[in-house]
Amino acid sequence: MDVLARCSKCGAGLPVRAADAPAAIRCGRCGSDIPLSFSAAERADTAVDSCPVCQGADFYTRKDFDPTIGVTVVVIGAAMSAVFYWFGRDLVAYSILGGAALIDLAVYGRLKDLTVCYRCHTEFRGAYRCTAPAFDLHIADVLEQEYERRIGRR
Ligand SMILES: [Zn+2]
Ligand SMILES: [Zn+2]
């Protein structure tokens, strides 16, 4: 499982492999040490049960969406259809636009799920099954505030 540990001081994302992760990593941006405690399930890539950074056990699942891919497809599609539109081939122009939108949908549908820690926003990618529920704004509010008080950010 690949983990993007979130530095509690500066919010930088630090990639770690759970299988051979050290007991602590140093943040490349602000230099603070971040202790990591991975569970056996996380090292074996079977489940996300406790957060290695904040020890929380509240997670949500979201699509691993890379917005740059989708935007690129739409921009290229729009540029191509503009050319055809210019030459008076409206139908071709519209079908290219529609095609770009379809490719976008296909890209979105193939996206993998990833698990995110509500408190510190550490991300977990791997072959394990994502069982966490979808994002809930109310839970996020409560847990983020609790975590920020704990680490003394507010
Ligand atoms: Zn940092
Ligand atoms: Zn966490």
Image (cartoon, rainbow, N blue to C red):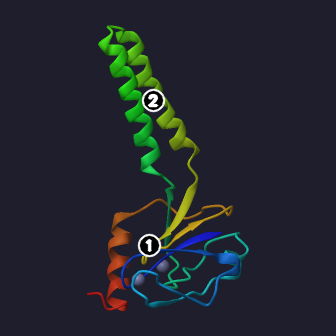
In percent of width and height, residue 111 lies at 56, 48
Disc number at residue 48? none
> Left or right: 148 with respect to 16?
left
Image quadrant where one finds the C terminus: bottom left
Give the quarter the ligand 1 occupies. bottom left
> Left or right: 44 with respect to 66?
right
Q: Earlier in the sequence, mark 2 or mark 1?
A: 2
Q: Quadrant of residue 132?
A: bottom right
Q: Quadrant of residue 16?
A: bottom right
Disc number at residue 100? 2
Q: Residue at x 61, y 90 (%)?
A: 23
Q: Which residue is mark 1?
A: 121
Q: Is mark 1 within 8 Å of ligand 2?
A: yes
In percent of width and height, residue 34 lies at 50, 88
In percent of width and height, residue 86 lies at 30, 14
Q: Quadrant of residue 19?
A: bottom right
SS class of the residue under badge 2? Answer: helix
Q: Residue at x 49, y 36 (%)?
A: 105
Front position in the image: 58 or 93: 93
Q: Are marks 2 and 1 in contact (CB under 8 Å)?
A: no
Tag nearer the camera, 2 or 1 = 2
SS class of the residue under badge 1? Answer: loop
Q: Amino acid at mark 2?
A: Ala
Image quadrant where one finds the N terminus: bottom right
In the displayed orientation, state which residue is furthest to the top. Answer: 88
Q: Residue at x 39, y 63 (%)?
A: 136
Front position in the image: 136 or 111: 111
| Gap in angstroms between the C-alphas marked 2 and 1 | 32 Å
Q: Amino acid at mark 1?
A: His
Front position in the image: 124 or 133: 124
